[in-house]
Image (cartoon, rainbow, N blue to C red):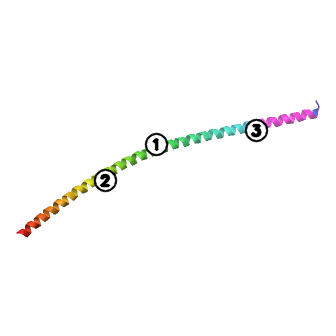
Amino acid sequence: MTAERLNRMEDEMETIKELLISTARMAERNSESINRLVERMSEATSNVDRLAVAQLNAEERLDQLTALMTRFVENAEADRAVVRGIQTENQRILEYLFGQQEGQ
Protein backbone atom coordinates (compact mmCIF):
# COMPACT_ATOMS: atom_id res chain seq x y z
CA MET A 1 0.00 0.00 0.00
CA THR A 2 1.17 3.38 -0.81
CA ALA A 3 1.39 6.27 1.60
CA GLU A 4 -1.23 8.13 -0.41
CA ARG A 5 -3.65 5.27 -0.09
CA LEU A 6 -2.98 5.03 3.66
CA ASN A 7 -3.64 8.77 4.03
CA ARG A 8 -6.93 8.41 2.15
CA MET A 9 -7.94 5.51 4.39
CA GLU A 10 -7.06 7.52 7.48
CA ASP A 11 -9.10 10.45 6.16
CA GLU A 12 -12.03 8.13 5.44
CA MET A 13 -11.75 6.57 8.90
CA GLU A 14 -11.69 10.05 10.44
CA THR A 15 -14.81 10.96 8.44
CA ILE A 16 -16.53 7.77 9.58
CA LYS A 17 -15.55 8.53 13.19
CA GLU A 18 -16.99 12.06 12.92
CA LEU A 19 -20.19 10.70 11.37
CA LEU A 20 -20.54 8.15 14.17
CA ILE A 21 -20.00 10.83 16.82
CA SER A 22 -22.48 13.12 15.07
CA THR A 23 -25.03 10.28 14.80
CA ALA A 24 -24.61 9.44 18.49
CA ARG A 25 -25.19 13.09 19.47
CA MET A 26 -28.24 13.27 17.24
CA ALA A 27 -29.59 10.05 18.73
CA GLU A 28 -29.08 11.46 22.23
CA ARG A 29 -30.91 14.70 21.33
CA ASN A 30 -33.72 12.70 19.75
CA SER A 31 -33.97 10.55 22.86
CA GLU A 32 -34.19 13.66 25.05
CA SER A 33 -36.86 15.11 22.76
CA ILE A 34 -38.83 11.88 22.92
CA ASN A 35 -38.60 11.92 26.73
CA ARG A 36 -39.94 15.50 26.80
CA LEU A 37 -42.77 14.53 24.46
CA VAL A 38 -43.65 11.57 26.66
CA GLU A 39 -43.77 13.89 29.70
CA ARG A 40 -45.98 16.37 27.83
CA MET A 41 -48.26 13.58 26.68
CA SER A 42 -48.52 12.32 30.24
CA GLU A 43 -49.42 15.82 31.44
CA ALA A 44 -51.99 16.17 28.66
CA THR A 45 -53.51 12.82 29.60
CA SER A 46 -53.71 13.91 33.24
CA ASN A 47 -55.37 17.17 32.17
CA VAL A 48 -57.90 15.28 30.04
CA ASP A 49 -58.63 12.97 32.98
CA ARG A 50 -59.19 15.96 35.29
CA LEU A 51 -61.43 17.60 32.70
CA ALA A 52 -63.44 14.39 32.32
CA VAL A 53 -63.97 14.25 36.09
CA ALA A 54 -64.94 17.93 36.13
CA GLN A 55 -67.40 17.31 33.31
CA LEU A 56 -68.96 14.39 35.18
CA ASN A 57 -69.27 16.55 38.29
CA ALA A 58 -70.85 19.35 36.26
CA GLU A 59 -73.30 16.92 34.67
CA GLU A 60 -74.22 15.56 38.11
CA ARG A 61 -74.77 19.08 39.44
CA LEU A 62 -76.85 19.94 36.38
CA ASP A 63 -78.97 16.84 36.94
CA GLN A 64 -79.46 17.87 40.58
CA LEU A 65 -80.37 21.40 39.52
CA THR A 66 -82.82 20.07 36.93
CA ALA A 67 -84.48 17.87 39.56
CA LEU A 68 -84.64 20.82 41.97
CA MET A 69 -86.19 23.05 39.30
CA THR A 70 -88.72 20.34 38.45
CA ARG A 71 -89.75 20.07 42.11
CA PHE A 72 -89.92 23.87 42.32
CA VAL A 73 -92.23 24.04 39.30
CA GLU A 74 -94.40 21.21 40.63
CA ASN A 75 -94.65 22.92 44.03
CA ALA A 76 -95.42 26.26 42.39
CA GLU A 77 -98.19 24.67 40.35
CA ALA A 78 -99.61 23.02 43.47
CA ASP A 79 -99.43 26.34 45.35
CA ARG A 80 -101.13 28.08 42.44
CA ALA A 81 -103.93 25.49 42.53
CA VAL A 82 -104.37 26.12 46.27
CA VAL A 83 -104.46 29.89 45.71
CA ARG A 84 -107.03 29.46 42.94
CA GLY A 85 -109.14 27.35 45.28
CA ILE A 86 -108.89 30.03 47.98
CA GLN A 87 -109.80 32.74 45.45
CA THR A 88 -112.79 30.72 44.29
CA GLU A 89 -113.91 30.17 47.87
CA ASN A 90 -113.43 33.85 48.71
CA GLN A 91 -115.44 34.78 45.63
CA ARG A 92 -118.31 32.50 46.75
CA ILE A 93 -118.18 33.95 50.25
CA LEU A 94 -118.27 37.50 48.89
CA GLU A 95 -121.14 36.65 46.57
CA TYR A 96 -123.00 35.06 49.47
CA LEU A 97 -122.35 38.02 51.76
CA PHE A 98 -123.36 40.57 49.12
CA GLY A 99 -126.43 38.49 48.38
CA GLN A 100 -127.31 38.54 52.09
CA GLN A 101 -126.92 42.33 52.24
CA GLU A 102 -129.22 42.89 49.29
CA GLY A 103 -131.80 40.69 50.87
CA GLN A 104 -131.93 42.70 54.09
Q: Is residue 76 left or right of residue 26?
A: left
Image height of 92 relative to 29, above or below: below
Q: Residue at x 86, y 36 (%)?
A: 11
Reading the image, the residue beneath label 1 is 53
Label tally = 3
Q: Mark 2: which secondary structure?
A: helix
Amino acid on which the number 2 mark rests in the picture: Val
| Distance in Å between CA atoms under marks 2 and 1 | 30 Å
Residue 95 in which image quadrant: bottom left
**Mark 1 in CB contact with mark 3 (< 8 angstroms):** no
> Mark 3 or mark 1, which is nearer the start of the sequence?
3
Q: Mark 1: which secondary structure?
A: helix
In the rendered image, residue 33, in percent from the top left (x then y), is placed at 65, 41
* Magenta-drawn stretch contains 40: no
Q: Which of 26/53 is in front?
A: 53
Reading the image, the residue beneath label 3 is 22
Q: Is residue 11 left or right of residue 65?
A: right
Amino acid on which the number 1 mark rests in the picture: Val
Residue stretch in magenta = 4-22
Reading the image, the residue beneath label 2 is 73
The local crowd at label 1, few if under 14, some if 14 to 19, many if 20 or more residues have their Cα within 10 Å, is few
In the rendered image, residue 96, in percent from the top left (x then y), is placed at 11, 64
Q: Mark 3: which secondary structure?
A: helix
Image height of 75 relative to 9, above or below: below
Amino acid on which the number 3 mark rests in the picture: Ser
Viewer-nearest of discs 2 and 1: 2
Q: Dominant secondary structure of the magenta stretch?
A: helix
